[in-house]
Image (spheres, rainbow, N blue to C red):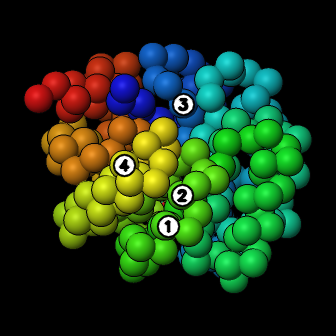
């Protein structure tokens, strides 16, 4: 089943409750956490996730674009995240493994995220014990960027590895996804779509979510 995860990075932060209310037909809320070090931007932190949790029952898909994410796993779990994505490039393998172990101990869903530069084979050693792979289709850091078609090959390869090693694992794509590029990523094997501008830049966010879902119809 195709799942839609609108990114609130494109919402109005003074009206988050209203804007999250507009995406009730989505499957998740995508929350972009940036630390100004792993990526050249600073966005949302733990207290905001905690407030969002109090106002929605939607699944909270929290994308950590922070260095050494193991330091913040407990804080985001306490805040109410349902899934945490950690970037493979954000720490040494031992740090990433420690973060995944901490997530397992806390019972939160686990995802590995890949920057466009990262070889898709890098996910193979983790596939056994994660719930999702997040493939970036822009350089992480900002919403509203152009979709990188060159990442379609990465999506296809990650889908092959998932089918081989852990077919239950989800494959999420993030960056420049709209109703046109959604079709391409779904064909390449993605089943979870993040969309910021395509949902919140639209006059009717619910209609934009429906248009993304239509990408699934062959
Ligand atoms: C970028 C973030 C994305 C971003 C997507 O670093 O990870 O989630 O919000 O925004 P759009 O859909 O506008 O490309
Ligand atoms: Zn994101």
User: Does dot 4 land on a helix, a strand or a loop?
Assistant: helix
* Mark earlier in primary sequence (4, 1): 1
Q: In front: 155, or 76?
A: 155
Q: At x 73% / y 59%, what residue is drawn?
A: 100
Q: Position of residue 147 (x, y in %)?
A: 26, 59
Residue picked out by circle 2? 127
Label 4 crowd (10 A; few <14 / some 14-19 / many >=20) = few
Label 2 crowd (10 A; few <14 / some 14-19 / many >=20) = many
Q: Residue furthest bottom?
A: 92
Quarter of the view holding residue 47: top right
In the image, taking residue 135 as reference, residue 37 lies left or right, namely right
Q: Are marks 2 and 1 in contact (CB under 8 Å)?
A: yes
Q: Position of residue 193 (x, y in %)?
A: 38, 41
Residue picked out by circle 1? 123
Q: CA distance from mark 4 to mark 2?
A: 10 Å
Residue 143 vertical placement versus 180 (above, below) = below
**Quarter holding ligand 1:** bottom left
Q: At x 83% / y 56%, what residue is drawn?
A: 102
Residue picked out by circle 4? 163
Q: Residue furthest left?
A: 218
Residue picked out by circle 3? 28
* Mark earlier in primary sequence (4, 2): 2
Label 1 crowd (10 A; few <14 / some 14-19 / many >=20) = some
Q: In front: 145, or 67?
A: 67
Q: CA distance from mark 2 to mark 3?
A: 22 Å
* Mark earlier in primary sequence (1, 3): 3
Q: CA distance from mark 1 to mark 3?
A: 23 Å
| Tag nearer the camera, 4 or 1 | 4
Q: Are marks 4 and 2 in contact (CB under 8 Å)?
A: no
């Amino acid at each position: 089943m195709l799942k839609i995860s609108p990114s609130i990075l494109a919402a109005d932060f003074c009206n988050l409750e209203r804007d999250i209310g507009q995406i009730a037909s989505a499957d998740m809320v995508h929350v972009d956490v940036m630390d100004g070090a792993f990526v050249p931007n600073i966005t949302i932190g733990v207290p905001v996730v905690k407030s969002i949790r109090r106002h929605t029952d939607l699944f909270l898909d929290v994308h950590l674009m922070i260095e050494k994410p193991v330091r913040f796993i407990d804080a985001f779990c306490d805040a109410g995240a349902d899934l945490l994505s950690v970037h493979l490039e954000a720490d040494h393998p031992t740090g990433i493994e420690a973060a995944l172990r901490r997530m397992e101990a806390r019972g939160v869903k686990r995802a590995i995220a890949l920057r466009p530069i990262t070889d898709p084979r890098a996910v193979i050693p983790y596939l056994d014990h994660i719930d999702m792979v997040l493939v970036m289709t822009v350089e992480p850091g900002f919403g509203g960027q152009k979709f990188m078609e060159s990442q379609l090959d990465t999506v296809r390869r990650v889908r092959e590895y998932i089918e081989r090693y852990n077919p239950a694992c989800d494959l999420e794509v993030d960056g420049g996804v709209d109703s046109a590029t959604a079709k391409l990523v779904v064909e390449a094997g993605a089943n979870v779509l993040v969309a910021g501008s395509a949902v919140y830049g639209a006059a009717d966010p619910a209609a934009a979510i429906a248009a993304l879902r239509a990408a699934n119809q062959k």
